[in-house]
Amino acid sequence: MYKIVKRKQLNDTVVRLDIDAPFVAKKVQAGQFIILRIDEFGERIPLTVADADPEAGTVTIIFQIVGRTTMLLSQMKEGDALLDFVGPLGKATEFGNIKKACVVGGGVGNAIAYPSAKALHKAGVEVDVIAGFRSKDIVILEDEYKDACDNLYITTDDGTYGEKGFVTNKLQSLIDAGNNYDLVIAIGPIPMMKFVSKVTEPYNIKTLVSLNPIMIDGTGMCGGCRVTVGGEIKFACVDGPDFDGHQVDYDELMQRNSTYRNFEAHDKENCRMYKAAEQVGGAE
Ligand code: NAD
Ligand code: FES
């Protein structure tokens, strides 16, 4: 069992949990993920690791409440324990030998962008971070980012905090201002990663995106996480989750990720997780 040692609500729908998982904490690198299961009936969900403390033996996950499992997970308290916490899975981010990077995070994707900024900054790379959110009330990780980069730019779609606009607007203006990035890392909603890649493509800036397709086994066996990159089929769980942003078929990924959206939203009658959430007073 994997005990929750710390729980923090970051905004209305985003929760941070620090999990006691010493073996994962020792090995995990930026970009890798874990698969967890709350209990023996539970769905397996993949989550990219947000942070780890090898000394304390803890692994930090940050997730948005989007379905039954994340809702149940959000209702767990410090001292509760998860049945399974498997990892680290996937390949670590390959940064290459670089001098200047821009890390771009969108919404809850910032939880996954943050470890890349931290790792690059620690390695002596000059790091700009653009963290985009819809509005001020859902900004997360501002303090953590400040310690993990040289320049932090926060954008909000509605202009209630930082600069008004999308992360892509800020990235374009930083490139126009003469910033020569060797690498851009973009993690967030699929349209965001698509349009960040469109911004960087004309300048030939290496761009990595972290893909989040549907995953089941996480070991390359089931094919659930199939994505098309550069016209070739790849499995995000073993070949990724990071890929060349200029090569990803984003439209196919969006279409595949929406397969179970109606089921998740409407199948309350038959959903055991939904009933369990109702019992603890959490279902919508
Ligand atoms: P959001 O929709 O609020 O967007 C966050 C920011 O991304 C916006 O503020 C904007 O700056 C930028 N953005 C969004 N759409 C854009 C576009 N078309 N062009 C340019 N910039 C754009 O994000 P959210 O609701 O916090 O994110 C949830 C989504 O992120 C879910 O779909 C989730 O699956 C995905 N996600 C992806 C990963 C990953 O590994 N890639 C990780 C966590 C979450
Ligand atoms: Fe099954 Fe990747 S999750 S092959």
Image: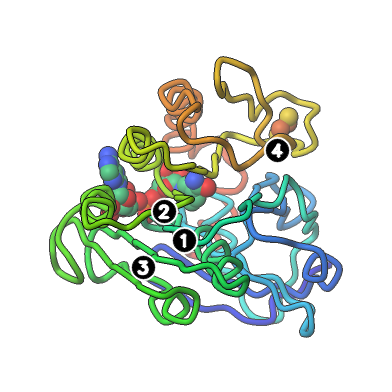
Ligand 2 is in which quadrant of the figure? top right
> Looking at the image, which is closer to me, 224 or 227?
227
Spatial separation of the CA atoms under disc 4 and disc 2:
28 Å
Mark 3: which amino acid? Asp
Q: Residues within 10 Å of mark 3 (few under 14, many from 20)?
A: few
> Looking at the image, which is closer to me, 57 or 105?
105
Quadrant of image for the N terminus = bottom right
Report the residue marked by disc 1: 100
Which mark lies nearer to you, 4 or 2?
Answer: 2
Which numbered disc, 1 or 4, marks the residue that appears first in the sequence?
1
Spatial separation of the CA atoms under disc 1 and disc 4:
28 Å
Image marks 2 and 1: residues in contact by CB distance under 8 Å: yes
Mark 4: which amino acid? Cys
Which mark lies nearer to you, 3 or 2?
Answer: 2
Mark 2: which amino acid? Tyr
Q: Is residue 122 above or below residue 90?
A: below
